[in-house]
Image (tube, rainbow, N blue to C red):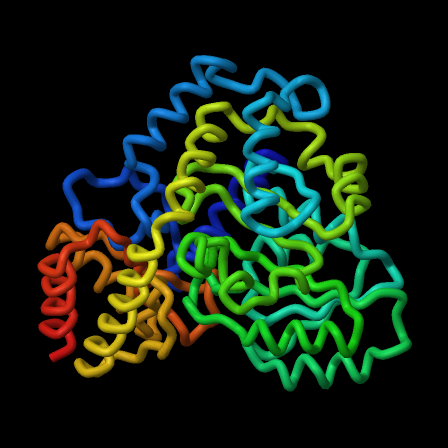
Amino acid sequence: MNSQEIFYKRLEEALNERRDQNRFRSTQTRPSGVLDLCANDYLGMRRHPLVYEKGLAAAQTYGAGSGASPLLGGFHPCHEALLEQLKVWKQKPHGMLFNTGFMANQALLKRLPGPDDLILCDRLIHHSMIQALDRSQTRFKRYEHLKLDALENELKKAAGDYQTLFVVSESVFSMDGDYPDLKRLAQLRKEYGFIWILDEAHGTGVYGAKGAGLAEEMGVADSVDILIGTLGKAIGSMGAYVLSQRKGVIDYLSNHAGEYIYSTFLPPFAVGAASAAIELIQKASPDRQRLRERAVEVRQELTRIGYEVNPFDSPIIPVMIGDSEKAVELSRRFLEENILIGAVRPPTVPVGTERLRLSLHTGLSDTDIQRMIDLFSKWKA
């Protein structure tokens, strides 16, 4: 067997292992005409006519693509305007844009912490963060999910042993739809002096008087040192941002983050669309309120039927199944009924927490919700 055959055999063996564990995944074309309970477009912005309009206007002015990386002419006036809009909305004086949230998290966590620092992170932070930490030069520890007493114990043990302490958390967790006590985190920051990095990818649009996120709603935006977010999810476009209290953070990343320096920048359509969506989101308080009320109602109905769900109010609802094969089978049965619901399995989530992940949005009618609940009830029996 030559070296090429050895290589392809190794790949096939790894894939067969995934198949044997019911964890094999492949990209499927999105079916048309289905009831969508997968998309993170919580407020329906990606189909809003004003979002289309402003996206097209930006593309007509600046072109279909940005034409270059941001440091070599790819940063257009539309990018500058969006960044200024984000800084005002999110209450941060300094910031930068990235092509994706994955790239933003990689750049931030691989580049900023040093070898004499310590990062304390929630056990269930996003894979983009964990992968960055695995590749960084900095020691990190993961505390039990949402358990801030455990975090404080680690902070006490680490006091004086490191140059800088970092605490990393999501606001709303992407696979669980739950969230930590941000007021307590802000108080811990005051007591222990760590750098607080908060990912608002799934809090944006859904929480806060102007939809700026859970930090806005909890009144702790000023306490967050570095804020990460996406232009996907509720904003309905693509891209990401890093916002900071200190200009040095942004200047450092602009000079050291290859994820920013060496990629053609965000296309103008995505930038214009995101800007329009942010304007709309700030005025969408009734939609936010109804979405969260509906999320509570759906959780109550699923609990009544006998499913395990958490008691939060985010539009992300994990319905615990506990078995990969059963989760995939339920997802398939829903699709046969023209309802698109994702089955989430290891390694995305821990073994034993396999689930169906519901993602509610404002485009769902009462009839849509009831049809889904009826099927959950039918298949529980």
Please name the residue shown 79% across and 84% down the image: 156
Q: Residue at x 36, y 42 (%)?
A: 27
Quadrant placement of the C terminus: bottom left
Which residue lies at the image location 29% right of the left edge and 61% below the top edge?
291
Front one among 323 and 299: 299
Give left or right: position of 276 versus 122.
left
Does the rendering let one see residue 17?
no
Judge left or right: residue 159 versus residue 3. right
Note whether 195 is above or below 238 in the view shown. Answer: below
261 left or right of 148 in image? right
Coordinates of residue 164 in the picture (x, y in percent): 84, 65
**Whole-percent x and y of residue 23?**
40, 59
Q: Does residue 79 appear in the picture of this structure? A: yes
Quarter of the image that includes the N terminus: top right
Whether 379 is drawn above or below 60: the answer is below
In the depicted view, which residue is nearer to us: 317 or 27? Answer: 317
Which residue does the image show at 41% across and 26% down from the upper left?
55
Please identify the quarter of the rendering in which residue 96 is found: top right
Percent coordinates x, y for residue 237 in the rendering: 42, 37
**Towards the viewer: 289 or 363:** 289
User: In the rendered image of this protein, does residue 53 appear above or below residue 212?
Assistant: above
Frontmost residue, 26 versus 305: 305
- Res 360 → quadrant: bottom left
Number of marks in the image? Answer: 0
List x then y, in percent, for residue 346. Answer: 45, 64
